[in-house]
Amino acid sequence: MRQKKKSELLTEVELEFMTELWELGEGTVRDVLDQLPEGRDLAYTSAATILRILEQKEFVTSRKDGKRHVFKPTLAKDAYQTRSLKDLSMKLFDDTPASLVARLVNDDALTEEALGQIRALVDRRLKNDSG
Amino acid sequence: MIPGDALLDTFINANILLIVAYALWSVARYAFHRLGLSHSYATQLRLLNAVFVAIVLSPFLILAFTTLQSSGYAKSVNMNLSDMVVAYYLNGGFEMQATEFERLVNLRDTFTNNVVNAAGWMAWAVICAFLVGLVIGAGRLAYSMFCLHSIVSASYAWRSFGRIRLRLSDKTLVPFSTRGLRNYYVVIPSHMLGQRQELTVSLAHEFQHLRQGDIEWEIVLETLKPFFFLNPAYHAWKRQVENLRELSCDAEVLNRGRIDVRAYCDTLLAVCQQTLRKDRMFVVAVPKVTLVTADRSALRDGRMTFLERRITSLLDLRHLRRPRLLYMATLLPLIGAIMLTAIAIQRPGDWSQDRLMLSTVVNLERLDEINRLSTFGRIRN
């Protein structure tokens, strides 16, 4: 098999694992499994496989600690959020982030408080760019 | 080197045999249905495959038969359809002008000669249509194999035992299996690792496909498709094999008793839902055997979808008592009929007594026509 092209995005189950790892900072397979919600029927070997795939995708690195492998994210959560949003903007909003924000702002479920926070963020960004 | 007309002749015979075999198969299937044996999917699949092998092997049988006849055995046995029709005609079986009848009898020979010598626009049209179809079909197959290779090579190694490689992929939403020159690849969508029931069902299903040799059959049928693209019986045959292999696989997995029928049906429905998402590369990729495929056309036409049929048959699963007896009892007449047809549709070897007689009648008819015309003064020497 030829060298595979690295996937830029995570699948649902991989994201679930990365979320736990981001929260933990670093952890073993068992640590991640313990973090998962109760009733999540996932075998140890399956969890180990998912972490190994994440390592192949270069989302995590691992080091040996005795008999166990300790996994650590190589990508920060906000960096992945940016990547994921860029992908969403490209695929769903014709590569125009303004459309994405417009859709978000037009959402009726958004509270006034949340809208205020968005406005503050935009103002801060504009001030930084002009200053 | 094999002469062109012999090759073309074999190809025409294979096409005729496929049509006859499919017609015979339809009769057998109807008989199964009437006898309440519709659920004997594994037997039916084996029958279809065995008949296909018989079609492939038929040129060798014919060779053996002609060798036997040329060495003096069974010389009086004439099973050539064309010769039989000529004899029937000469015995007054039906009325027709001898010239017209001879033209009909020689139609295949004329067609073969025209195509081999590229004589006439009709022959050119046939050659061009075939070559264009063949090139498009071969190109499509190469592209499909490239897509499949891309999906498999982009997947992650999970486990391996013997020649089986289990791989996880985030590029596909449907489990499937395929093979390389040596190894078998079972590719499972990586999200399934989090769904134990779907994973178990998918693996059991794909392993059953490997046991049944479905991948090899898929490879054979996909490889031959560019050659037989003009033959509707071939497409119908392939569809039958595809349907039967899934129905048989479902039945065999459940008969093992390790998986609950509800869990199995739930998985089929869940995975089918995933296939409804458009994934062109996956749809195009062949040769592979998947857990389930979405039947969009049926949804459009309001017909019963194949998935519906699968689930209904799973809920109505019955154990066949004597599968071998049924298999042999159906196979022998089917193979016998195929072999007889194979011998009957051969080009007649040489001039038989009846053919000489027909030729004489045709010549007399022509002489009569010349005489008649010259009587009225139209032909002058």
Image (cartoon, helix red, strand yellow):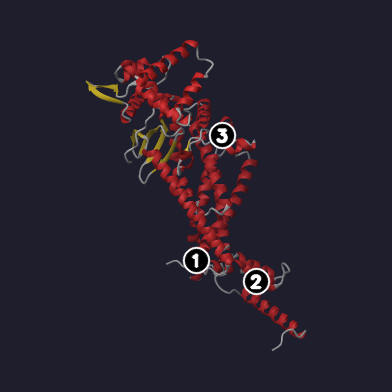
Q: Would you identify the image quadrant in which residue B176 lies? A: top left
In the depicted structure, whether residue B33 falls above or below residue A121: below
User: x, y percentage for residue B329?
Assistant: 56, 47
Q: Amino acid at mark 1?
A: Ala
Question: Is A25 positioned to the left or the right of A108 in the image?
Answer: left
Question: Is B256 positioned to the left or the right of B155 in the image?
Answer: right
Closer to the camera, A18 or B269?
A: A18
In the depicted structure, whether residue B350 falls above or below residue B258: below
Q: Amino acid at mark 2?
A: Glu
For disc 1, the marked residue is B6
Separation of disc 1 and disc 2 at Cα? 22 Å
- SS label for mark 1: helix
How many numbered discs sit on the rendered protein? Answer: 3
Residue at 41% across / 35% down in the picture? B187
Closer to the camera, A109 or B204?
A: A109
Quadrant holding the C terminus of chain B: bottom right
For disc 3, the marked residue is B307
Which mark identifies residue B102?
A: 2
Question: Is B344 positioned to the left or the right of A21 in the image?
Answer: right
Residue at 47% across / 46% down in the picture? B217
Q: Amino acid at mark 3?
A: Leu
User: x, y percentage for residue B36?
Assistant: 63, 38
User: Are the residues tagged 3 and 1 within 8 Å (C-beta)?
Assistant: no
